[in-house]
Amino acid sequence: MADYFGLSYPHEFTSAVLLLIALILLRVVTIAHYRFGSDEPQHLHVVWGWARGFVQYRDLADNHMPLFQILCAPIYKLIGDCGNILYWMRSILQPLYIVAFWCTYRIGSLLFSRRVGVWAAILVGLSTDYIFCSVEFRTDNLWAPLWLLCMSVLLNGSLTTRRALIAGFLMGLCFGVSMKTLLLVMSILVGGSATLIFIGRERLGIGWGQILGVLAAFFASALIVPATIMAAFALNGIWPQFRYWVFDHNFVPGLRNHPAWWVVIFVVAFLFVNLGARRIVAAMPEAAMAARRSFVFVTAGFFITALVSFWPFLSRQDYLPFYPLAFVICTGAFLTISDRWAQHRNIAKIWRVVPMPALVGVCELLVALLVHPFWEDKAKPESDLLRATLKLTEPGDFVFDRKGETVFRQRCFYPVIETFTEERIRRGLMADNAIQRCIDTRTCVAILPDKMPPATFRFVEQNYLPIGNRLRVAGVLLQSSTDGKHFEFQIVIPASYKIIARGVGTVTGMLDGERYEGKERFLSPGTHTFVQTSTGHDLVVFWAQAVDRHFRPIEW
């Protein structure tokens, strides 16, 4: 095996095997302990909707293409509603990581050697940003492996129509997962064009007819999946909602994560990318190998510079397609340089015992453990939230949350509350009727996250009492203005309530002039009065269903 992969035996081979084992163990621990991001329950909520007969965009708001959620729906139906569903869905995505790992190895092998492929796959897997982002249940972890498969197909041989059809179909699957694929297509076109210019058609033995035929096959194949998805939604009368959430919603004029003058960075950076590609071509006598290296280098360089310079809102998952290509290029250059240094006798003795790639991998592993200590279980709060939601609510109950954090229940407020939604509400481009929807749907369960429109935040804070796990339940703390027996309070959410007190079995008295003996009472919006005849203190008007299921406000 050491000979096959070009690894020196025993030290380099052994260190690669040990780091691979460490990578596998780290991923297992990360699945179970790494915190769940806000996007994970959002995607899972849409998957739940498909599994329950709801339709994305029409019944559930979502600003992503639907292929990922549709593919996950049958798997969800097999698992069912359970508090640990997010762990299951993370685990189910891990074969996609194996695909990405293999593609990284394959691209490294095609560009340099099997040795470079092995180390590139291991080192990118141990890099902090990549390992923790790639373990999450999110659309990008289907999108990035599909892109890497597309690149592997394009690099794996001569440019033929058959190869273009396969690569184009894979790119079409990327479009079915995310419209961010548009940047990937642009990167491929720029990378291919630059490579053609730097090397020349004559040296590559490609005619214009072949180039045009390959491009036509690629784009025709790439259109199959997105065109099918769009036609399906259009034929079912959901085109307006689909178009808004996939296209219109994600483009807010003037919303940028950086100043406009950053376009200068793109111009300068991409100029250096092209200069680097020309040096690569000049250093390689073999045209096919020079074309592969130049193509990957320019494609990755254009992607990252365009992403940083032009993308309106950057998130860490946007870099997932870039990391494997970057590590292939850097690992190839690093091993080439280190092999030259190893010609010196003293350095060679050290590196035979401690190979430089292994040292880099160990450093990455230590950084990953320091940034996210595996002994801290940061995923448990989200699973506790889901268990509490299942215990607290019935399938027909509505909840209020930002993006679907409660997963298993319908949201009373249709839009997802994220960056683009908040900006649209701030500009008056979208109505913020969250408060009215809570009232109209008699929503008695809510989550109070940090990021929310101020008016909605105050409404939830004032009319829902915390019960832990970020959950809040409709209720009011009773404040006495006289002798501790007479209370006047406001109800905003119409529902059935009970009056409870700390340490008292049953609270009795006169509620709105009628005898109250601890049984649930429907209270309409407005002012209500209560005169206590029992001896309880710290009285709370609380949603009756929560009381019956043994939930209490954490103020107690």
Image (cartoon, rainbow, N blue to C red):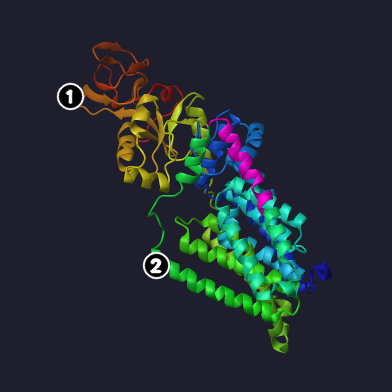
Q: Nearer the viewer, residue 151 or 291?
A: 291
Compared with residue 363, is residue 21 higher up or lower down, i.e. above or below? above
Seen as rendered, the residue at the extreme left is 482
Residue 489 image point, x, y percent: 24, 25
Q: CA distance from mark 2 to mark 1?
A: 66 Å
- Residue at the spot 60% in from the left edge and 65% down from the top edge: 190
Image: magenta residue range:
219-237
Magenta residue check for 288: no
Residue 205 shows in the view: yes
Q: Main secondary structure of the magenta part?
A: helix
Q: Secondary structure at mark 2?
A: helix
Residue 478 image point, x, y percent: 26, 27
Label 2: which residue? 261
**Identity, as a three-letter code, of the amino acid under mark 1:** Asp
Magenta residue check for 228: yes
Label 1: which residue? 483
Quadrant of the snapshot with the C terminus = top left
Residue 284 sits in quarter: bottom right
Residue 270 image point, x, y percent: 53, 71
- Residue at the spot 64% in from the left edge and 60% down from the top edge: 125
Q: Nearer the viewer, residue 255 or 337?
A: 255
In screen coordinates, is 436 left or right of 388? left
